[in-house]
Image: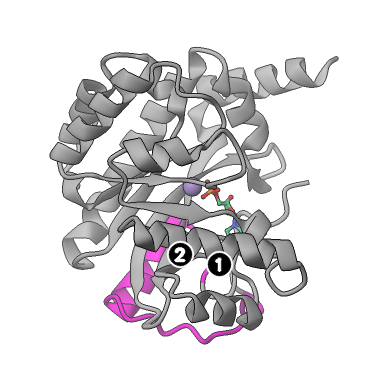
Amino acid sequence: MTADRVAQQALDRALDESEDLLLVYQPIHEARSRRIYAVEALLRQRRENGEIREAGIITAAAEHGPELFVLNSLTVRTAFTDAAEWMGRASGVRLNLNLSPREFEESDIVDRLESLIAGCRADMTRLNLEITETSYFERPEETIEALVELKRLGMQLWLDDFGTGHSSITQLQQFPLDGIKLPKEFVSEVECNRRCRAITRHLLHLAHDLGLEVIAEGVETVGELEFLLEHDCDYIQGFLFSSPMMLADVEELLRQSSGASPLPARARRDGDPDPSSPSS
Ligand code: G
Ligand code: MN
């Protein structure tokens, strides 16, 4: 059986029995204060043996077909329903959701998102939409109109994994963005690779010059953190501060910290549950 076929079967199964799919949540911290700034919803797959792993095979299979819309609706609805409770308590903490450029191929993206969200009790103005780079924007002009509309509704717009996929500087110029996410591919190399250091430093400066904020992804070491702080990175996401966790655990963390992170600056604590650990 080909890899495509395996992936398609996994996707069909996941959508048939959506208990195969679950969301985990990874905090994003303010770089200096370490306060929790936001929580990103990440899709995971529960295997037959109970193991939880990244859902990359499923999202890749969905990326080019109509299932993408079903999958995204499921994710948005679940994340918003989950967030309604903690948003009420943890004042100001935002929810980051991933959205594929393909969503913008359909003209009703704004209506769809608005009605999905209206069905939940969570606050739309505390939503950060992370637009991923897995495919092109087929209809750039309509996309910009939709993005402007989403911003008018109070959402923030971020480009995810900037610089690794189909992103272009033109998007920084044309899209009504609030920020970019620096991919872990650059961040994880800043201590040992001169090119990654240069790229990271210049992307931070470029984003700030454009009035955009920056979230660095995949921060695992104090050395990486120090480099990012030196260049005024705004937010940090990575195992150094917090791993992806189950909803109950993120709720507990938000309850304990009321926004002020009690986490020490060191790698994952022994015994910390990491429901999304290594995926193969
Ligand atoms: O969609 P996005 O590129 O924002 O997803 C981030 C992914 O990176 C998630 O799947 C998350 O589990 C993973 N991740 C988050 N923090 C770290 C980290 O510190 N190291 C590594 N290797 N992966 C991370
Ligand atoms: Mn993301």
Estimate how packed mark 2 is, as few (under 14), some (14 to 19) or many (20 or more) residues with alpha carbons within 10 Å: some
State the mark number for residue 274.
none
Q: CA distance from mark 2 to mark 1?
A: 6 Å
Q: Left or right: 188 with respect to 247? A: right
| Circles 2 and 1: CB atoms closer than 8 Å | yes
Q: Which amino acid, mark 2?
A: His
Q: Secondary structure at mark 1?
A: helix
Q: Is residue 168 above or below residue 161?
A: above
Most foreground residue, 97 or 154: 154
Residue 134's spot in the image, x, y percent?
Answer: 57, 31
From this viewpoint, is residue 244 visible? no
> Ligand 1 quadrant?
bottom right
Which quarter of the picture shows residue 33? bottom left
Q: How is the image coloured?
A: one colour
Q: Which range of residues does the magenta coloring cover?
A: 242-271
- Which residue: 18% across, 31% down? 149
Q: Give the main secondary structure of the magenta stretch.
A: loop
Q: Left or right: 108 with respect to 26? A: left
Residue 257's spot in the image, x, y percent?
Answer: 33, 79
Residue 243's spot in the image, x, y percent?
Answer: 55, 65
Residue on which disc 1 sits:
201
Which quarter of the picture shows residue 247? bottom left
Is residue 245 on the magenta stretch? yes
